[in-house]
Image (tube, rainbow, N blue to C red):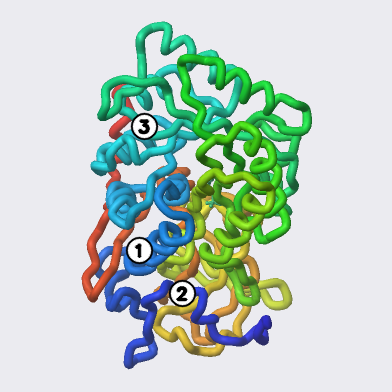
């Protein structure tokens, strides 16, 4: 399936509404991406709103109410509102994510609170806000919920106060066959209650006996960027078999669905994934409602990042370095996981890409690589806008202010309109937490 090294960008890697303009340039959401770069500057994250909505709607249709968008993939108030409007719940895992989701106006009972080390303050914040579910990760966390209940801190809900509504996160002992940094379902993991050692069973018994919590179900999330259908199926089977005897109403299979980043990769659709895990659960006799928490599968393909080419350094017989105005501070995935991306020039989307280049950022590190061995048209020049597709998940959200490089702006495009949802940082923003001596 992989095209020749000089093939044009596979258009399937672009957001749903991508089209080609009469000069061969890329439009997304009816907006000319070169004009977006001129108007908002670069680096720039451009999200296709229709693409985001389509994936959220697909998730709700595939799993039903209760499916949650994992906000760590990409979160700002506009994103939280969009997912909420499309009928998704939101998975938040820190006080910060919880704060942003609430600030976006998402009702607390539509939120699922995650985290392997939630502090007392985070748990108290979640309970007093009235979050719909807390996914409990450890016995220490059950202790904290007991302590909070003893102090009279209960979940605030429509019908008054109540115990925390919880799911227990299980570690099913499954290899996700993904990068070790994002594999979370194997026994040697910081997350959850280990099924194989019997801890999971003890956690269920303890939760059922505690007046501080109402146990609604079990949960497992085996990792991210998972392409192994077998691993997803096995994990669902293990937790379903474990849940069946307790007759709990809910079962969450987490997130993790792998998406295609480069030519030749192919992932399941959300609909296909739902079928696989629901069938696996049904086969065990477990009748719980199957829930999930996709992040990457919602957001990754929705965005492209636009950069401006600043320098081109050709080293004969070695490589050609193309330096852009961003780097590991707006997309750390290549540095963290060795992730691959495609490259293209939005001014000539369908052009053959005959030149192999290494796209690097502006940080003072040799490791600051965005794309190793990307391909671009031969006539790439300083000043060109260069783009990487499939950068909607774990790019902006994992970015940093390393070297006080300003964090980029984020725009949502739809129906020919672009709206800035996160503005570019300013130099003065960098001084906001810097308490003058
Ligand atoms: C990260 C995470 C998700 C989302 O993972 P994706 O790979 O982005 O789908 C879902 N649930 C939990 C508990 C997570 O940690």
Q: Where is residue 125 in the image (x, y as percent from the top left)?
A: 35, 23
Compared with residue 369, is residue 33 higher up or lower down, i.e. above or below? below
The N terminus, quarter of image: bottom right
Q: Nearer the viewer, mark 3 or mark 2?
A: 3
Q: Position of residue 296 (x, y in %)?
A: 51, 56
> Within 10 angstroms of label 2, few (less than 14), some, or many (20 or more) residues?
many
Marks 2 and 1, Cα distance to the nearest angstrom?
15 Å
- Whether label 1 lies within 8 Å of ligand 1 gets the answer no
> At 52% across and 65% down in the image, what residue appears?
271
Marks 3 and 1, Cα distance to the nearest angstrom?
24 Å
Observer-nearest residue: 303 or 249? Answer: 249
Q: In the rendered image, which residue does mark 3 sit on?
A: 131
Q: In this view, does 288 lie to the left or right of 227?
A: left
Do labels 3 and 1 touch, CB within 8 Å?
no
Q: Nearer the viewer, mark 3 or mark 1?
A: 3
Q: Residue furthest bottom?
A: 22
- Whether label 2 lies within 8 Å of ligand 1 gets the answer no
Q: Which element type, helix, strand or loop, lies under badge 1?
A: helix
Q: Position of residue 335 (x, y in %)?
A: 61, 52
Can the viewer see residue 424 in this picture?
A: no
Q: In the rendered image, which residue does mark 1 sit on?
A: 53
> At 50% across and 86% down in the image, what residue appears?
379
Q: Which residue lies furthest to the right in this view?
A: 197
Q: Which element type, helix, strand or loop, lies under badge 3?
A: loop
């Amino acid at each position: 399936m992989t095209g020749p090294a000089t093939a044009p960008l596979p258009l399937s890697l672009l957001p749903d509404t991508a089209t080609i303009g009469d000069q061969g340039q890329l439009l997304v959401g009816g907006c000319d991406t070169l004009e977006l770069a001129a108007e908002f500057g670069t680096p720039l994250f451009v999200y296709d709103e229709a693409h985001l909505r389509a994936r959220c709607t697909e998730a709700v249709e595939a799993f039903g109410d209760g499916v949650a968008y994992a906000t760590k993939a990409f979160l700002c108030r506009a994103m939280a509102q969009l997912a909420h409007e499309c009928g998704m719940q939101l998975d938040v895992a820190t006080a910060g994510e919880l704060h942003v989701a609430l600030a976006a106006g998402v009702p607390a009972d539509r939120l699922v609170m995650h985290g392997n080390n939630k502090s007392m303050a985070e748990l108290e914040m979640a309970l007093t806000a009235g979050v719909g579910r807390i996914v409990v990760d450890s016995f220490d966390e059950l202790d904290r919920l007991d302590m909070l209940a003893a102090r009279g801190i209960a979940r605030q809900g429509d019908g008054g106060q109540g115990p925390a509504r919880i799911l227990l996160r299980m570690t099913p002992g499954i290899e996700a066959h993904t990068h070790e940094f994002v594999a979370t379902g194997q026994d040697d993991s910081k997350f959850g209650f280990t099924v194989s050692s019997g801890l999971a069973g003890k956690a269920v018994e303890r939760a059922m006996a505690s007046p501080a919590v109402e146990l609604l179900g079990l949960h497992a999330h085996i990792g991210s960027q998972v392409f192994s259908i077998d691993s997803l199926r096995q994990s669902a089977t293990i937790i379903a078999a474990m849940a069946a005897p307790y007759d709990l109403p809910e079962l969450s299979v987490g997130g993790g669905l792998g998406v295609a980043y480069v030519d030749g990769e192919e992932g399941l659709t959300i609909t296909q994934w739902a079928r696989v895990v629901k069938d696996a659960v049904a086969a065990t006799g477990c009748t719980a409602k199957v829930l999930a928490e996709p992040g990457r599968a919602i957001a990754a393909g929705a965005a492209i990042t636009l950069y401006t080419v600043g320098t081109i350094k050709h080293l004969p017989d070695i490589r050609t370095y193309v330096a852009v105005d961003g780097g590991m501070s707006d997309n750390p995935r290549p540095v963290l996981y060795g992730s691959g991306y495609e490259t293209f020039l939005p001014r000539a989307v369908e052009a053959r890409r005959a030149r192999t280049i290494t796209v690097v950022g502006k940080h003072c590190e040799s490791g600051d690589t965005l794309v190793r061995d990307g391909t671009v048209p031969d006539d790439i020049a300083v000043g060109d806008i260069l783009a990487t597709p499939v950068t909607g998940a774990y790019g902006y959200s994992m970015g940093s202010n390393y070297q006080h490089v300003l964090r980029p702006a984020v725009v949502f495009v739809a129906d020919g309109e672009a709206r800035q949802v996160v503005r570019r940082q300013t130099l003065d923003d960098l001084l906001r937490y810097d308490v003058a001596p």
